[in-house]
């Protein structure tokens, strides 16, 4: 079991560029989440999904889009990156309770 | 919306002393409270959790207490060791009846154990 994996691990973008972060889990979890982590602000929920084909907004959804076409994958898209989106992004998945986190993606927008 | 406040933001203790981190939540329907430990450059990892029908839970040197009336819960680490140095996050899960498992995290506590 690989658990929760994220691709890529690091990325540098210029303002206005777009990119997609991929999260994959092999634990057959129904629920998947995208968080961003900034210094002093903890983990803030961007979007989440309660099952294949479903998505919902979290605390800070603006500037991001997500898709859950397959149960095991949860994609996070940035259509037009901004410096304020510089952060570490964590994906997580869960069954009934405990979210398991992926290793994170460090994104820098210049 | 739901909110979780966590204090203190930083905490330094001498090796062997105890450390206490406190969290307060706003949604009275929250019923599950996990704690995560995050070492530098690593992912958050669950260390202990508590459900709303339990007042205290212990696992070796760590324990969590919950006061539902006051809507706060705490992490206690006894006999601290240098390897306990990390950032600790509390979280609260809103009601099951909402049909979702949306976790709201506190802002984290950076614990430093001084040798």
Image: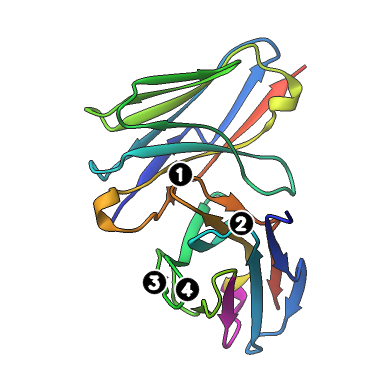
Of labels 4 and 3, the one closer to you: 4
Name which residue lies at 48% across and 58% down.
Answer: A44
Name which residue lies at 71% across and 84% down.
Answer: A14
Q: Which of marks 3 and 2 is nearer the N terminus?
A: 2
Label 4 marks a residue whose chain is A
Q: Do labels 1 and 4 share a chain?
A: no
What quarter of the picture does the N terminus of chain A occupy? bottom right
- In terms of image quadrants, where is residue A91? bottom right
- Mark 4, secondary structure of its residue: loop
What quarter of the picture does the C terminus of chain A occupy? bottom right
- Mark 1, secondary structure of its residue: loop
Label 1 marks a residue whose chain is B
Q: List the residue tagged with mark 3.
A: A56
Q: Which of B38 and A3 is in front in this view?
A: A3
Q: List the residue tagged with mark 1.
A: B106
- Mark 2, secondary structure of its residue: loop
Residue A75 among magenta residues: yes
Q: Are marks 3 and 1 on the same chain?
A: no
Does B50 sit above or below residue A14? above
The circle drawn on residue A27 is 2
Of labels 1 and 4, the one closer to you: 4
- How far apart marks 3 and 1 lie (CA) works out to 21 Å
Of labels 3 and 1, the one closer to you: 3
Q: Over which residues does the magenta segment extend? A: A73-84
- How far apart marks 4 and 3 lie (CA) works out to 12 Å
Q: Do labels 4 and 3 share a chain?
A: yes
Residue B35 spot, x, y in % from top left? 51, 36
Q: Are marks 2 and 4 on the same chain?
A: yes
Residue B12 spot, x, y in % from top left? 63, 24
Q: List the residue tagged with mark 4.
A: A52
Q: Which of A48 and B74 is in front in this view?
A: A48
């Amino acid at each position: 079991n690989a658990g929760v994996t994220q691709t890529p691990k690091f990325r540098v973008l210029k303002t206005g560029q777009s990119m997609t972060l991929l999260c994959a889990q092999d634990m057959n979890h129904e629920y998947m989440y995208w968080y961003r982590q900034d210094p002093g602000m903890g983990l803030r929920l961007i979007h989440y999904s309660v099952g294949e084909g479903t998505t919902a907004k979290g605390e800070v959804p603006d500037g991001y889009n997500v898709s859950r076409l397959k149960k095991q994958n949860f994609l996070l898209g940035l259509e037009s990156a901004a410096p304020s989106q510089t952060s570490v992004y964590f994906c997580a998945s869960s069954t009934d309770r405990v979210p398991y986190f992926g290793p994170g993606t460090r994104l820098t927008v210049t | 919306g739901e909110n979780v406040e966590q204090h203190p933001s930083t905490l330094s203790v001498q090796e062997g002393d105890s450390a206490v981190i406190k969290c307060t939540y706003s949604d009275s329907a929250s019923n599950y409270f996990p704690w995560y430990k995050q070492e530098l450059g690593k992912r958050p990892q669950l260390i202990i959790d508590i459900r709303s029908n339990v007042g205290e839970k212990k696992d070796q040197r760590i324990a969590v207490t919950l006061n539902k009336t006051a809507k706060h819960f705490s992490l206690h680490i006894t006999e601290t060791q240098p390897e306990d140095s990390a950032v600790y996050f509390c979280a609260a899960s809103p009601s099951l009846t909402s049909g979702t498992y949306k976790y709201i995290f506190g802002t984290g506590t950076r614990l430093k154990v001084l040798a």
